[in-house]
Every structure is written in structure tokens, then in C-alpha cells.
Image: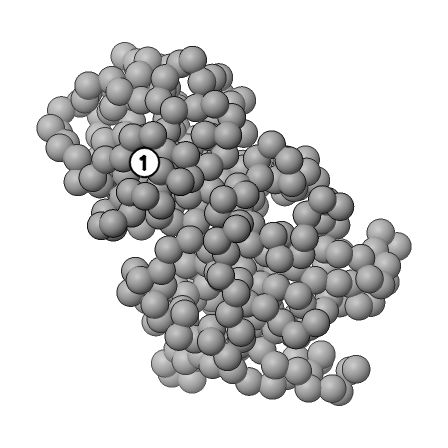
Amino acid sequence: MDHEEFKAFQIRRNGEISSGLTRVVLDDLSPGNVLIRSAFAGVNYKDALATTPHGNVIRHFPRIGGSDASGWVAASTDPRFKEGDKVVVCGRGFGTEHDGGFAELIRVPADWVVKIPSAMSLRDAAGLGIAGYTAALAVVLLHEAGLRPELGRVFVNGATGAVSGMGIEMLASLGYQVTAASSKSGANSYLEALGADEILDASMADSGKPLEKARWAAALDALGGQDLSFLLRSLKPRGCVASFGNVKGNEVNMSVLPFILRGVKLIGVNVTYYMDREVELWDRLASDLNPARMLADVRSISLEELPGHLERMLEGRTTGRTVVAFPA
């Protein structure tokens, strides 16, 4: 197996960034003590961004992309895993600082590997991936910050994105009233099916005042920039925003008044710092936080179809979640 070639999607830099399918051997992979035969790999916007010159996602090349993947353990020197175990890997630099999931074989440190719950399929594990894990973490952090259904509506922006969409479905299943906002036309039926009972156009009027009308008990923010500022200024007293994206920018211009007059909170959601809760969150993703509607709509593509799909993601022409399916 050490010298056997297998297929992978690799990102290279020879003056300019380029990417495409290639064949590699085990010695080409980043080090690790668990070897996994890939079943599925989730496709994320970050994976698409990594193929662009302005993405600044990858520092060392060449790199096999793919931020999350599921499969079967093929070999392990760590006693926690044995051949045939069904596992998932996501986060921790997988696909950016370490060769990722867009390959027929994956090699990672054992501490990065999680056995999937018995009630979860390998396809669903990859369909959830870092997006599902982020959504679940955001919802749990809002709950731990004091959010309850009786306190009012939860606002979700970037609603057709994978993390926001799963967040909508999770919140609705827990009994929350969800307001969704998206700039994509024709998305209403899709968002209603996920559980949003109010849908707003993403271009809501922002007065620019230090405080807007208090409307939301909490929010999930995928956009950052002034959209995040607007959300914080529109929260009810003691409201909370869980922020996990910066599509609209890194800068947030606002006063401190929402924090000191309304007592609002801003929580940053970065899964890297919550990996100690992996087992708990994956168990919940298989039960009360399972976004069954979104998982039912997950698309499967081949590794050969991946380059075209990444281009469509960068152009904003994709919705929901897609996984690369590898031959069994």
C-alpha cells in the first residue's frame, strides 16, 4: 500500500495558485498514526476559497484540500482505533495545514479522529462535517448563554449557506421561532422547509443609530462586517449573537452602547477551541440536533466533478450541502 497510487485533489503554488486531480502515494501525505479509507468528504466554501490566489487559506504547498471527511479505519498504531471503525475527521487544520479529505486515503493524528455514533451513516457524518459541527456548537453556545424559546425570535443571516441552514433546522426543532434572511431570490420555500417561519430580505434598513429597534432574542451571524453590527444593535436586552462567518468583512463599526445599555453578548464560534466537546456534539448531531431535512437533500458528486463544483461555490451558485463520494 505504501507505493500504491491513489487519486487526490491537490492545490499547488508554482508562482500562481493552481489545483486539480492528481495521483499520490502514502509518502506524499502529511504524517499521522491513523490511516483512513475515504467514504465521503464534505465540500465547504473554505475549500473553494483555498483554490484562489486571494484566499490565503493555505500556507504550505502542495496541499490536498478538504476540511472534513468520513470513512473506515484502514490501519492505526493507536489502540483507540481498529481496522473497520467508522470515523469522521474535521477541523484542526485538516485540508489547510494538513492534507485533507479530498483523497481516496487520509492519514491524520489519532486525536483528530472521532468514531461516529452508531445511529449515523458515513454519508451523514460527511454531510454534517465542519458545517454541522459549527451549527451545533453555535446553537449550544446560545443555549448556554441563556437563550430559551420563550424569550423571542432568533435571527439567522446568510440563511441559504450550509451552517446557517442547519442552524435554522436545529433551532426550529428545539421550538424556537426563526427569522431567516437571504439575498438569494427564490429561497423562501427552501427556508420555510428548514423551519423558518419568517423570511426577510437581506437588505434590511439600517438607520446607523447606536441602537436599532430591539427585535431579536438572539442571532446566528454568518456575514460579519456591518451586518453583524446591525444585529448587535437590534438585539433585545440580554440578547446574544453567535458569530461564525465574515463573508461581508472583518471590520465591525459600532459603539459600545448595545453592550452597556442592553447587556447584549457576542460569542465567537470557532470549532478549533471546542474540540474537547466532540463526542458530546456528534452524539447530539445524531439525535436532537440532527438536521434531517438538510441531510436528505445532500448532493453527492465524484472527485472528478469537484473542480467544477468549487468554481460554482465561488460564484455563489450553490445551495445546501454537497459531499464527494468515493468508491466503496
Could one spot residue 208 in this view of the protein? yes
Residue sitting at x 50%, y 79%: 304
Q: Position of residue 232 (x, y in %)?
A: 29, 27
Q: Amino acid at mark 1?
A: Ala
Q: Nearer the viewer, residue 5 or 52?
A: 5
Which quadrant of the rendered structure holds the C terminus?
A: bottom right
Q: Position of residue 28 (x, y in %)?
A: 66, 80
Q: Specify the quadrant of the image occupied by residue 164.
A: top left
The residue positioned farthest toward the right in the image shown: 79
- Determine the secondary structure under disc 1: strand
Q: Which residue is mark 1?
A: 180
Q: How is the image coloured?
A: one colour
Q: Is residue 209 left or right of residue 20?
A: left
Q: Position of residue 259 (x, y in %)?
A: 32, 19
Q: Position of residue 216 (x, y in %)?
A: 31, 22
Residue sitting at x 68%, y 47%: 120
Q: Nearer the viewer, residue 96 or 122?
A: 122
Residue sitting at x 40%, y 69%: 310
Q: Nearer the viewer, residue 235 or 33?
A: 235
Asked if residue 42 is positioned above or below residue 52 in the image, the reply reads above
Which quadrant of the rendered structure holds the N terminus?
A: bottom right
Asked if residue 21 is positioned above or below residue 80 in the image, the reply reads below
